[in-house]
Structures are given as C-alpha cells and as structure tokens.
Amino acid sequence: MDAETAAIRRRRAVLGMTQSELAKEAGVSQSLVAKLEAGTSDASYSRVKRLLDVLDEKEHATGLKASDAMSRRLCVVAPHEKASKAVSLMGKKGVSQLPVLEGERAVGSLSEEDVLARVEKGADLSSETVAAIMAPPFPQVDEAVPLQAVVALLMHEKAVLVTKRGKIAGIITKSDVLSAASKRHV
C-alpha cells in the first residue's frame, strides 16, 4: 500500500482536487488525507481503499491523456555530441534531463544527476561524449495512454517520452504533470 499512498498527493493534484474535496467524497477527514500524503499516518486499508477508489473514478471520468500534459518542445542530444554541449543546452533551455536520440530512436537519457556523478569522478565534460555518460532511455507511452499511467511511471522515472504513430512527439516530466493539474479544475 505504501506506493499507492505515496501517489495520492500526485494523483489528487493531477485531478485538481483539494484535500478537503477528496476527503469529503471518500467519507474521511481532511486531516487523514494530509497525514497520508505526508507519510505520517497508517490508515486502515478500508480508508485508503476508499480514497483510491475516488481517485480511480475521477481519473476515469476526466479522460486525461498523456497528450494533455506533454511538452511538445523536445530538446534532445545525440550520443556522439560532447557532454559539455549537452550541459550547455540543459542550462539554456532550463531542463534537468534530455532524451538521447540517434535519428528518431531513443538510445539513452541524460540528467543533471548523471553529469554530476561523472564530474565527481573527475571527468572532463569537454572531452567526454554523451554516450559515455548517458543512462538508459526514458520509458515511452502512446499519446492516448491515460495520464494516471504516466503519473505512476513518474514515481520511478525522471521523464516519460510520448509517441504518436510510433514517433517521439513529446516528453512529460513531473513539472509538466503538476502544470497540467494547476490549469485543469475538475
């Protein structure tokens, strides 16, 4: 249940619900929702199940898809490019991770954490290639996938690539989901 209770806040935010609204619909107190989201309460299975059932019902009713939250402005790097160029692009575009593409195929990912780990080991970013630093590629989902599935992936991944007819069409990060949630009131 721990993973599910940890996702309550994010799922609620995506739906644009307040803690009070969720609590009222589930028949529990707002303080219980707050404590669960903060990880300071061990609620009974039945109470957590009621909260999750309300969230499931609302998510199904909203019909939010991956395409509703994705950023279409995709910044990418190639594996043969210098790591210093990738870091410069990340700073210029204000992003903390980049997909690494070879042609139209995702072959890896690069994040600030990946770069920092190499710098800590004494790497010279001006001579290292992206391929030497990159991590495995971000997971990919079709644009029609329910946003709740993307939120579940983002609990464990830094980003999710969104495809349209098999081609990469965008990217979703945690901040994209929260931005979509703040713009949509259900």
Image (spheres, rainbow, N blue to C red):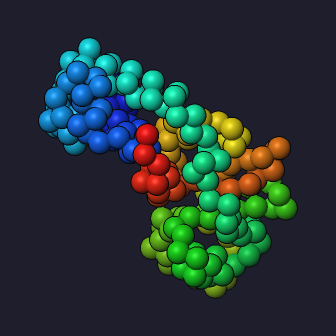
Count of numbered badges drawn on the protein: 0
Q: Report the residue at 58% width, 76% height from top.
A: 93
- Outermost residue toward the bottom in this view: 126
Answer left or right for 163 relative to 52: right
Task: Please determine whether, in this image, residue 113 is positioned above or below residue 42.
Answer: below
Q: Report the residue at 68% width, 56% height from top.
A: 170
Task: Please determine whether, in this image, residue 182 is positioned above or below residue 41.
Answer: below
Task: Please determine whether, in this image, residue 54 is positioned above or below residue 85.
Answer: above
Where's residue 180, x and y in %? 50, 52
Answer left or right for 100 relative to 10: right
- Outermost residue toward the front in this view: 186
Q: Report the residue at 57% width, 51% height from top.
A: 69
**Nearest the camera: 139 or 94?**
94
Answer left or right for 2 relative to 138: left
Q: Quadrant of the C terminus?
A: top left
- Outermost residue toward the top in this view: 46
Where's residue 114, x and y in %? 53, 64
**Nearest the camera: 143 or 110?**
143
Where's residue 102, x and y in %? 81, 61
Q: Is residue 155 visible?
A: no
Q: Quadrant of residue 95?
A: bottom right
Q: Quadrant of residue 58?
A: top left
Q: Report the residue at 20% width, 39% height from top.
A: 34
Where's residue 142, x and y in %? 71, 40
Q: Quadrant of residue 3?
A: top left
**Nearest the camera: 97 or 149?**
149
Q: Quadrant of the N terminus?
A: top left
Q: Is residue 183 visible?
A: yes
Answer left or right for 70 relative to 164: left
